[in-house]
Image: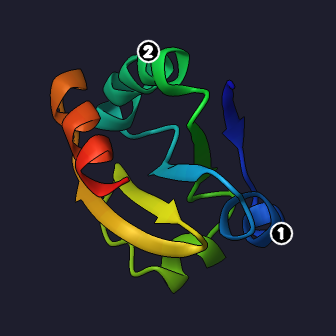
Amino acid sequence: MSIIAVTDGEFQDKVLNADELVLVDFWAEWCGPCKQLSPVLEQISGEMGDNLTIAKVNIDENPESPTSYGVRSIPTMLLFKGGEVAAIKVGNCSKSDLEGWIKENS
């Protein structure tokens, strides 16, 4: 499964109603750490794509979703399991840290 872009209007359907685990990356075009995290998410998507959907929400274009989850800085990643937030990770991180966080909370 590839990384999908999700809008506020699609959030309920693509994230909250998803059958599989969904990692939501709240990001913005102007955010340096967000851009550094992007290739890490691509790698994880390639390796864990059968069990995990990665959804990217651009906070400038979609302000409702990050506001409703209290996102104050980016990148912020929320892991959703069965429509509920299972874990939150703020800031850039290494691939191994991110993989460990996903496995620990899935």
N-terminal of the pair, mark 1 or mark 2, is 1
Query: How are the residues colored?
Result: rainbow
Q: Left or right: where does residue 93 sit relative to residue 17? A: left
In the image, 19 versus 25, the foreground residue is 19
- The residue wearing badge 1 is 9
Residue at point 25%, 56% (across, down): 89
Q: Is residue 80 above or below residue 5?
A: below
Residue at point 49%, 19% (across, down): 42
Say the numbered circle drawn on residue 79: none
Residue at point 23%, 50% (across, down): 104
In the image, 38 versus 14, the foreground residue is 14
Image x and y of residue 99, in percent:
27, 32
Which of the 4 image quarters holds residue 11?
Answer: bottom right
Secondary structure, mark 1, is helix
Q: Nearer the viewer, mark 1 or mark 2?
A: 2
Callout 2 amino acid: Gln
Q: Is residue 15 above or below residue 29?
A: below
Image x and y of residue 20, in percent:
63, 51
Secondary structure, mark 2, is helix
Question: Which quarter of the image is occupied by the N terminus?
Answer: top right
Alpha carbon distance from label 1 to label 2: 27 Å
Q: Left or right: where does residue 19 sit relative to residue 99? A: right
Q: Is residue 73 above or below residue 93?
A: below
Q: Left or right: where does residue 73 sit relative to residue 47? A: left
Image x and y of residue 77, in percent:
38, 54
Mark 2 residue crowding within 10 angstroms, few (<14) / some (14–19) / many (20+): few
Image x and y of residue 90, in percent:
24, 56
- The residue wearing badge 2 is 43
Q: Left or right: where does residue 13 sit relative to residue 63? A: right
Q: Is residue 83 above or below residue 94?
A: below
Callout 1 amino acid: Gly
Q: How many marks?
A: 2
